[in-house]
Image (cartoon, coloured by chain):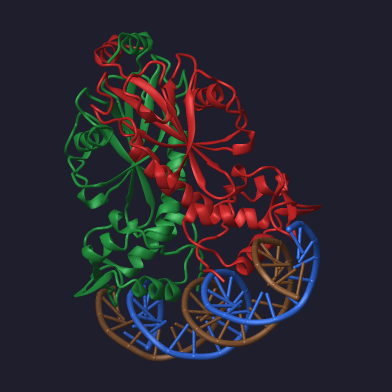
Chain colours: A green, B red, C brown, D blue
Amino acid sequence: MRIDILEQYQAQTRCLVALDSIIFGFDGEELKLLLVKRGIEDETHTWSLMGGWVQPEESLESASSRILYELTSLTDIYLEQLHTFGSPHRDPVERTVSVAYFALINVEDYDHKISKNFEAHWFSMQELPKLLFDHGSMVEMAIENLRYKASQHPIGFELLPEKFTIPQLQKLYEAIFGTELDKRNFSRKLLSTNLLIKLAEKQKGYSKKGAYFYRIDEEKYKKHFNNFLNFLPGSTS
Amino acid sequence: MRIDILEQYQAQTRCLVALDSIIFGFDGEELKLLLVKRGIEDETHTWSLMGGWVQPEESLESASSRILYELTSLTDIYLEQLHTFGSPHRDPVERTVSVAYFALINVEDYDHKISKNFEAHWFSMQELPKLLFDHGSMVEMAIENLRYKASQHPIGFELLPEKFTIPQLQKLYEAIFGTELDKRNFSRKLLSTNLLIKLAEKQKGYSKKGAYFYRIDEEKYKKHFNNFLNFLPGSTS
DNA sequence: ACAAAAGTGTTCTGCTTACACCCATGA
DNA sequence: TCATGGGTGTAAGCAGAACACTTTTGT
């Protein structure tokens, strides 16, 4: 390695590199976003995305998993890089480049008793508070991306418990797209993927008749992940 | 702002933040990638993506435009953030987080007489040399992304001169997707977008009959950018 | 006249949509 | 028994795919 290269490296300014996670959940009715008040340290009490800084020996992926784990104590969650935000003054304290990830978690698995270090709260997408810095744009981009992804890949399942019913899944898609779907067309297309395994058990309590539970065929799910689903329109009935 | 926040900021390590551009071009037959030897400074003579560092008062977008301008002296080119790469040791000299952008340029506009600071060369996608660091993965991700984008949005035009023929455009799509398309289906679907304006002039020299030139309707192009095109399969004839 | 590329239409198939009735059960 | 949500089938329309011949013109 030649000296002039090292000099070039030396001459550059270094930036803080942060990670922020847009964490989506679904409570059976609405799409939700998990926000935190970095309240212990911050008097302004603005809600913000869960975030943190990348550590010296960490990749971006593992840093964002770690940060998510610190908040939710969940592992193996769906996590995908969204976009990197780097306007010079997005963070007024010091220039910080932030890599945003979006995560899909199953709200039932989220244990809110854990990590009292953070004051966290699930917000309806309809009623988001004002967010820190440019976190609002991050959320906007994330929801767009989620819509696209969900239309093309069967990622909806990541937001549901292991056992779920078709009406639950339909409600989820309706929440993601903000539209109503025809249940006949929806279930036909869904079942035509052969991705679902019908269980003997029925859901109790929600409806009188009870809907059958299904689980996803993990093998096929991974294998067919890149197949288009095209779950977009289709109207009510 | 409370002291403990400032302390937290202080405690973090800073990283170098780089930008790398995956620059696509089309020569009428093949999809090409523009690579540079950062030869003046580098004895190893590895080819690499065009890159640079983000400056203190620059956004990521403007930094990548600037870097592209330094190499090609082109402005107003199609440039889109692809992904951010941050493995701890991807750059052996010092930890560098690199934000990759992909660019579409018209090869005819590219003036290779300019910027002798860089030894640059157009490579066929079939015959890429070994690349610096993780630039190979960047290129892989970029081509996937280009395929997707081109299938959903009419970005193909960005790679062509202002006036182009339908057979040229078809060859471009064939190069992007590595497949052959049926010219009847292709031109029908293309014209059905109403995005093309037929010119009186015909292309000379390439074929005996000569194909009509078209140009794109800029207004509609911008307006309909988000409309799906679905230019994927369709076989030969 | 012939070679080489441009240009153009039709049929078939399968997916998407729209739409309505019966079923099972808890209250 | 009735109200609520679960579950299923069918017909019409449309877009994608497959496919072949004529036109133009330079040599």
Return the residue nearer the eye: C13 or C23: C13
Quadrant where the N terminus of chain B is found in the figure: top left
Q: Position of residue B183 (x, y in %)?
A: 61, 66
Q: Please provide percent x and percent y for residue B85.
A: 33, 33
Query: Residue B19's image quarter?
Result: top left
Question: Is residue A129 shown left or right of residue B107?
Answer: left
- In depth, the one of A208 and B140 nearer the eye is B140
The answer to whether A207 is drawn above or below residue B83 in the figure is: below
Residue at 47% across, 71% down: A182
* Residue ID at (43%, 76%): A184
Q: Is residue A22 visible?
A: no
- Displayed quadrant of residue C25: bottom left
Give the residue displayed 67% in from the left and 48% down from the top.
Answer: B221
Residue A63 in the image: above or below residue C19: above
Depicted B191 relative to depicted A5: above or below: below
> The C terminus of chain B is located in which quarter?
bottom right
